[in-house]
Amino acid sequence: MPKSKIEWTQHTWNPVTGCTKISEGCRNCYAENMAKRFGGENGFKVKLHPNKLSVPGERKTPTTYFVCSMGDLFHEEVPFEFISKVFSVMQSRQMHTFQVLTKRPERVLEYYAYQKKWAGIVLPLKNVWLGVTAENQKEANHRIPILLDIPAALRFVSVEPMLEKITLEMLVAQNINNRFRTIYSSLSGRKTLWDTKNLLAEEKIQKLDWVICGGESGQKARPLSPIWAKELQEQCAKAGVPFFFKQWGEFTCKDGEMVRVGKKEAGHLIDNKECREIPKGAER
């Protein structure tokens, strides 16, 4: 897959721009900072761009699009009718692959129910990858189990910015009265129900097909510990799930301390190796 400014895709397509903060990973949002730099304080309000719907049809060779890199397609202010227009374009352009990343998987479920009721588009589309952002364990526990319940050709998670250690094989989705726990093993595709010590039930479920990871960049960036990234890479390797490490961000580890050196010097190697895997058969 050729390089682009966003290393894990080829092109961006923004029929929707703008968003609002809903979790800790949003604190230093690069898209918001960029939008305000060029559009002022109102530059990151949610906006629909019907004139951008034709963009994928203008490209005649197969490519990969990151959909709404400057916003969230499933933001509450984006009407389902407009989301359907975006999906209609993706359905009509089967030569392209579309990567849809959201922090709002609950609204994806609502949209799928809406689309099923009103017909028109048969979901899931085979050329649409669906992903969620999970910057910490709390959001991984919340968003990934919802993602796994949504029909999709390929499911992925973006652990960027990675703000703490995350275990994808032990997502505690429910904890009733501190006694019963539902645990999703999202890399191996297993769901289990436990009481305080005992396994009560087990079933096979869908799993993640791809994991992206990266540190935060920018003036207010928070450091990414090498231990967190290495452990996540090892989890993926053990499960056979492709792992794409985008960047360390602004910091590197020197003599056991996190030191700000800048994004370029920090680089993207883990133990002097490039870890930029993509799902099999996804090359363009």
Image: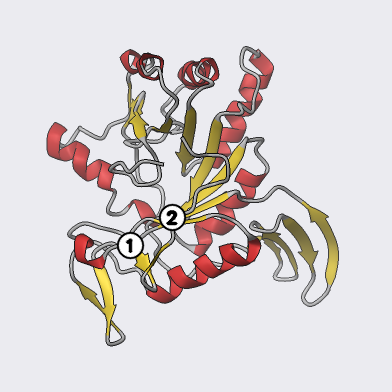
For the residue pair 172 and 207, the one nearer the viewer reads as 207
Residue 133 picture location, percent across and down: 46, 49
**Reading the chain from its start, which is encountered first: label 2 or label 1?**
1
What is the residue that sits farthest to the right in this orientation? 200
Q: Residues within 10 Å of mark 1 (few under 14, many from 20)?
A: many
Q: Is 8 on the left or on the right of 241, as rendered?
A: left
Which residue is painted at 36% across and 41% down in the image? 2
**How many discs appear?**
2
Q: Is residue 167 visible?
A: yes
Going 30% across and 69% down the picture, which residue do you hit?
A: 223
Give the residue number, with chain letter if any, for mark 2.
Answer: 276
Question: Which x, y percent locates residue 136?
Answer: 46, 62
Name the element at disc 2: loop
Image: 135 above or below 85: below
Q: Residues within 10 Å of mark 2 (few under 14, many from 20)?
A: some
User: Which amino acid, by three-letter code, is at mark 1?
Assistant: His
Residue 73, image quadrant: top left
- C-alpha distance separating marks 2 and 1: 9 Å
**For the N terminus, which image quadrant?**
top left
**Numbered circle sitting on residue 104:** none
Asked whether, in this view, residue 115 is left or right of residue 226, the answer is right
Inspect this view and state whether residue 40 appears: no
Residue matched to label 1: 268
Quarter of the figure with residue 280: top right
- Circles 2, 1 touching at the beta carbon (< 8 Å): yes
Element marked by disc 1: loop
Seen in the picture, residue 237 relative to 58 is either above or below; the reply is below
